[in-house]
Amino acid sequence: MKPISLFSLILFALPAVGQETSSPPVVDLDEIVVTGKADDLIGIVPSASQGQASAEDIARRPYLRRSEILETVPGLITTQHAGGGKATQYFLRGFNLDHGTDFATSIDGMPMNLKTHAHGQGYTDLNPLIPELIQRVDYVKGTYTAANGDLSTAGSADFLLFDVLPHDIVSAEFGRYGWYRGLMAGSLDLAAPPATEGNAAAKNPTPAAMADPETLTYALEYNAYEGPFDLSENFERWNGLLRYYRGDVDNHFAATLMGYRGTWTSSDQIPQRAVDRGIIARLGYLDPTNGGESQRYSLNLEWATREGDVVTRANVYGIYYDLDLFSNFTYFLDYPEQGDQFEQAEQRWIFGGNIARTWERQSFAGKEADFTLGLQTRHDLIEGIGLWRTQQQDRFKNIRQDDVYEASVGVYADSVVHWNDWFRTQVGLRGDVFYFDTASNLAANSGDDFDAIVSPKVSAIFGPWHETELYLNFGTGFHSNDARGVSTIIDPNTGEGIPTVDPLVRTMGAELGIRTQVIPKLTSTLTFFWLESDSELVYVGDAGLNEAGPGSRRFGAEWSNYWRPTDWFSMDAEVALTHGRFVDAGNDDHIPASVPMMFSGGVNFGAQGDADGFFANIRARAFGRRPLTEDNSVKGKSSFLVNAGIGYRKNHWEAAVECLNLFDRNDNDIEYFYASRLPGEAAAGVEDIHFHPTEPRSFRVRLTYKF
């Protein structure tokens, strides 16, 4: 492992800290009410597929798992093939994103994706999120945004936390299958003096006293879940947060400390034939010792300043993460005596940051324009990332173990020019440089490499006409490959020679979209997209090597509608259709697990937001059959799940009941097709569908006090 210097990181952060931040004149502004995906974004965003989801959008969705918050992104599906604290599976625009490849996720600009991960490239565990602390989710799809770099071909989502919570919260939940959750969160005003009988200033602060609010937000969450499976998940999660904030929207500083720890037992996916033969039940298991533990601790420092029309935003972060994961997908295929359980483990430090400066209302060719320059860097120091064969969590063979240093620097420029009242363009250019250094326990697989890539972006926006805009978008992007695959020349399983893989993989995409609010209270978007990838390179964590797949091409359409005719009723519906194929692959060109059709929709009744009264919601999510093999001879089942909730809110109290999988359907969360071996079967094993069932109907009760 080579030592690194943070000198460059500190250098680019200093301009945002050291410059004078004289306060601009106080201007009275109209109140902005954020309602989420129904917001009027005409004239603001450069594509039909870009948007935002508010805290209210999140709060009125009954969800089984923490990661389902990401389903506020239209067309995105999250499922689980294991259980407990393992990262979920993500699907979007015909991509099987595995645990996060090609979809970038962050919290206030701090990345959640983990490159060169023990289990999968781009691994994204959202268990550290506390839903009540999320103010907004900003999402973007496609390759058209200059600020988005690695792992963002399908899109990205940034979770923005509350600077100050609207209410202090104490909440308790309990439900079927041993579900328990407790949360305490609030914001302390550090600037205001305590209110006393003789302190009139504290009761009626002057505008000067309110100019620089200073708060400390805290949160502590505990969650336990046994689960419905024959093997108890024994899932326990602790989350904590401290966030210091001072300033306003234009000029502020924030420091956010987050901590997460989770432990669990996992039933993993199971073979269909084992259920058909009565060996195990549908909710059964084959290896009772699968599971894991993980923890993540982070510090994120953010700055923002405005001097007239010049805006600077920056953040620097440090993250510590570790994982110890035990899985068994093939049972007795490779090791008939000990079994095929394997362990994947790692621990890492991540250091990085972002800085961007925007010059607003400038002049270009006599037209009004905004210009942005940005710099991003990230450094992953991974120690002892490894793969072991285990029996009941005891190691008996080391497949590979590596120390990895992976670094990247990205520079981007972006310009928005308003050519006239009905036409504007957004043009961007991005350049990225990566360095990979792997020290492997097998000397032949050690090595280092540099790679670089340039990604142009361009968007043209027409309108608005009659509350309608048209969008044309084109851009190139990329995803990095696992650092170990860049230098691996010997298969650690077989000892045979294999070719190395390209460090960076080019992707390309385009969109034609429309956004309209011509019908009052209704926001509609329609998008036609096209995406290409030079090669679907995937690190196979179970084998300890990379497999280079053929190139791919996807195209499809997405239609989203958000209707809010009154204060007590709203509904939404999202449909996504995708056609995805490998390129130059002959008849075996189907992309396994590429979802061709997805629907999500919901209806909300009664008191919305924090209004008193009864409220209710119901949501449905469906996805169609999908190929499980390249020749399309085996397909997965379709899925249709409905969740619902009802509650009452009065003064500071709120009580709610949620029903998950309302119709108690026996659908599958995930399905794969591969060979495995049960006791007594032939040594070559049996090719079969392996699935993880959806959880049966369950109820959860929540009681919340806000003050």
Image (tube, grey):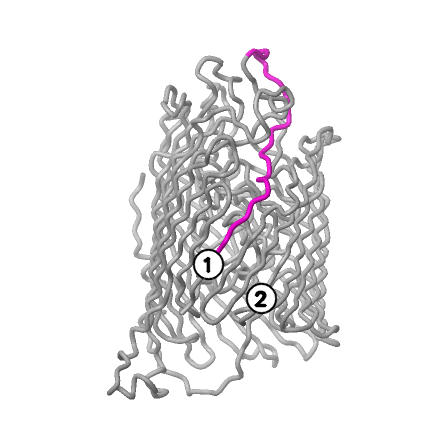
Amino acid type at image mark 1: Leu
Q: Which residue has dot 1 on it?
A: 703
Which residue appears at 52% of the width and 28% of the height?
A: 499
- Element under disc 2: strand
Which residue appears at 54% of the width and 62% of the height?
A: 138
Residue 641's place in the image compared with 483, above or below, is: below
Please report the bounds of the magenta region as a residue range.
680-703
**Residue 683 lies in magenta, yes or no?**
yes
Image quarter hosting the N terminus: top left
**Crowding near pointer 2: few (<14 within 10 Å), some, many (20+)?**
some
Q: Distance between the residues labelled 1 and 2?
A: 14 Å
| Residue 573 placement, left or right of 230 | right
Q: How many numbered badges does the structure rendering display?
A: 2
- Where residue 704 sits in the image (x, y, percent)? 45, 61
Amino acid type at image mark 2: Phe
Q: Do the residues labelled 1 and 2 touch (CB within 8 Å)?
A: no
Image quarter hosting the C terminus: bottom left
Which sits in the foreground, 216 or 320? 216
> Residue 614 got which mark?
2
| Residue 494 placement, left or right of 551 | left
Which residue appears at 50% of the width and 53% of the height?
A: 701
**Residue 500 lies in magenta, yes or no?**
no
- Where residue 533 sits in the image (x, y, percent)? 63, 44
